[in-house]
Amino acid sequence: MIGFRKPIRAKTLGRGSQKSQGNIEGGALSSVSLKNLVLSPDLETNLRQIKTILDRCSDVVYREFVFAQNEEIRLALIYTDGLADKVQVSDQIMKALALEVAMAAPGQEITKARALEFIKQRGLCIHQIKETNKVEDIIDAILSGDTVLLVDGHATAIINGARGFETRSISDPEAEPTVRGSRESFIESLRVNTSLIRRKIKSPNLKIESMKLGEVTATDVAIAYIEGIANDKLVAEVKNRLGRIKVDAILESGYLEELIEDNPFSPFPTVNHTEKPDRVAAMLLEGRVAIVVDGTPFVLTVPNLFIEYLQAPEDYYERFIFATAVRVIRFLSMIISLVLPSLYIAVVSFHHEIFPTTLLLNVAAQREAVPFPVFIEVMIMEMTFEILREAGIRLPRPIGQAVSIVGALVIGEAAVRAGLVAAATVIVVAFTGIASFTFAYSASIAFRLLRFTLMVLSATLGLFGLVSGLAIIAIHLCTLRSFGVPYLSPLVPTIGADLKDVILRAPWWAMFSRPRLIARQEQIRLEQGLKPSPPETRPKGKG
Amino acid sequence: MLKKITVFILLVLLTGFLVGCWSREEITQIAIILGTGVDWTADGRIRLTVQIAKPGSFAGGAEGGGKGREPASWAVSAEGKSIEEAERYLAMRVPRDIYWGHCITLVIGEEMAKKGTRIVTSFFLRDREPRETMWVMVAKGEAKDVLETHSNLEKTSAQAAGLLERMKTGYSVQLREFAEMLASKGVQPVVTRVEVKEAGVTPGSEQEKKSPAHKQVEITGVGVFKEDKLIGWLDAEKTRGLMWLKGEPMEGVITVPSPGEPDKEVSILIRRGKTKIVPKYDGKSLRFDVKIDMEGDMVEQQSLEDLAKPEKIKFLESGMAEEIKRRCNLALKKAQKEYAVDIFGFGNAFHRKYKKEWRELKDRWDDVFRQAEVNITVAARVRVIGLSTKRADVPEK
């Protein structure tokens, strides 16, 4: 936005009380201008300074009052209305300092010089306090929801962690619903999100490092990883890539995703995201690094492998036989969603030999009245499907579903009846559409794009085009890397031990090791010989 | 980087102009041929008849059902000096691209078969569209008549004929097998014979009564070839003997008299079997020992006697062996003495064992074969006789 690389009026505020309209406009945007700015012992000066910086911020509240035991000691509270917990601020800070200190420590004479120390030790009933003398920190604290207490005569402010803004309550994950397993989903508050992770992994090795990104938004970002499991180099790489970022705003984790991914032009995402804390916990335990961004329920995890799109959280909660069967289905759906329409186009317009005779005659009968070439026909139906799908998402919820269902039925049914499209085409398109929802949504977007490309190739070159397209996709996938880890691993390069969690989901008593290329080497997950078996003798009734 | 990407995108876009959807043919642009027939006309030209599927009649569901009894195929003929030429003339009548890829049957007319089948197979083996798995048949009469029939059960008569062949009720030959038999000197070709016959009329149906008797294709034995020329026929009974001697497929039902009550019959269904041909040649005389092992299950019994006795089963087995031997001999006599052609592949068996001698004999093999002695020994076994005769309501003797 406005020169975050080179702050235009970086120095103006630093020159002291000099103030003009211009420097506030520029100064507010550039945090650099606040650097090196410190508090003075004089309360008035400090207040004026802060008010200058937070000029025309009507939601910032300034409350000046005096200390209960010594009226000479003037105090000022600054907080942002709506972000600070008003009950805490009035009860634990104002009431305590203005009224109750006298009751708690009667008769004590508090001098101006001792005031700060006393307030810190006895006056405040707040769990989390921090001292600072930097204006930058103060501004940051105020705008983050903390309450700042300024004491006259001291060049130090006390930041009280009394945040209390409205957040959404934890609800079911909407983008990744499960039948079995945790129903919690992340919300928009970073602190709640990290607490959800911490609740799953109660280990001192779970490290949650935080930073602020975005020059204007100053968004809180946290990197979570388990020390000893995550590869140190990976953690360093993540920090390095995040540290490189100099943007004005981070409003969603998608901003970060695009700024740290390995191949920005690939249709395949190389950073995964999820809104399920249990999934993040599982990722961390495999040695991945999670990036939690304030303001979004979607947490990023890196490195991201292709097979992750075939893995659903439920796979690990259901018994392994069933989970494996479901994965096979998911894998087939993935192939179907990628190639079925192009295969249909190629076969119908080039390779009639592939059809069994009866099927060929059936398809021929359906297509007899259709006025378009099959490519145009499939294209129309695919576009219709995409439009309906998009409309279904964008429409207000109450009408959204009705419109999409009715639209699909009416368009599909009427188009077939009118002879504009063959019933087989509708089946192919509908089947493809449904199949594309069986695996992770972000991958299905990539597959949707590639599906259209393959359709064009099939329509021009038949199966040869389709196979060439698939070969190009395969080659591209082989070249992709996510944070140094080959995208197709453990398939390419093949890592035998890690194949236990690709199509086959090995039973938990056989999940001995963590993914080799992600976690640190020689990581043992569990002890050998945990496979349960019935006891040698039948348990007797008593004893 | 940006320049590279631009160049790459431009190259990709430009390739779009290079392709021309080569060989793209929409389904609606092709005439799907299901069956084809070749006849030799009286004035010495080749008549190509094709049975083309009418896609509209194949529609399933509510819309397609209303078409009623309108035939689902269209038979159309054209004449020419060669098959390709006839096909070109055909293309003037058929408004779509003639598409051979799904041709199920190739019917060769009797006159054409007598004239020589190489004229026919050359095209179908060379052209890239027809499959070598198509069923080859020889029509008693004209191939055109066979293709102009309609099936009562299947949509088209070509499909019906294909299914009949697939059932292996007769001796079924695919184009590939036919070509192999033509190429080999150790065996002479046999090809399924088809005839147009009047099918039985369904009793009670008003519509059937009004309509004229329905003509349908039926398999009636095989045609026997010498090289590529038709020289005679074998009927259905002898065809079975031919199949057993060739060792493929070992199927069929043998009916033998019941051991205790000779006027009642017992049917044995052949389950599996094996044929082994052992040639014996000492420079002058040639002998073939043919050993046939057959296993069957008893599936029908007219008498009430309990057959679960070793001697009775022995009796059944010997009756079965006799019957198999009799039918094999029938086919053998006809081929060896009347037609003097080796349609059983004895020559191939000889070739495998006497490689040097074969070189001398192969060019006059049919003559040699005519004088050869063939001993057929059959070992038959009945495995299952069932438990029905031991039921409680059958009085025990």
Image (cartoon, coloured by chain):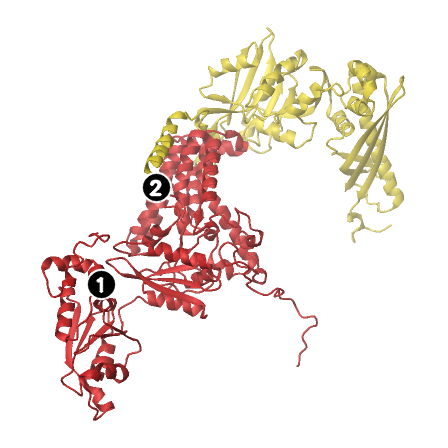
Position above or below: A169 against A215: below
Q: Residue at x 70, y 70 (%)?
A: A536
**Upstream in the sequence, badge 1 or badge 2?**
1
Judging depth in this view, the residue of A175 and A78 nearest the camera is A78
The spot of residue B33 in percent (x, y) is: 53, 24
Q: Is residue A174 visible?
A: yes
Q: Residue at left 65%, top 20%?
A: B138
Q: Which mark's residue is nearer the viewer, 1 or 2?
A: 1
Q: Chain of mark 1?
A: A
Pick whichever, A7 or A477, lies toward us: A7
Q: In the image, what residue type sits under mark 2?
A: Thr
The answer to whether any part of residue B301 appears in the image is no
Residue matched to label 1: A35
Chain letter for red?
Answer: A
Q: Which residue is mark 2?
A: A384
Seen at 22% across and 65% down, the residue is: A36
| Badge 2 element | helix
Q: Is residue A410 left or right of residue B143?
A: left
Residue farthest to the bottom, as pictured: A107
Residue A189 x %, y %: 32, 65
Tell me the shade of chain B.
Answer: yellow
In the image, which disc is placed on residue A490?
none
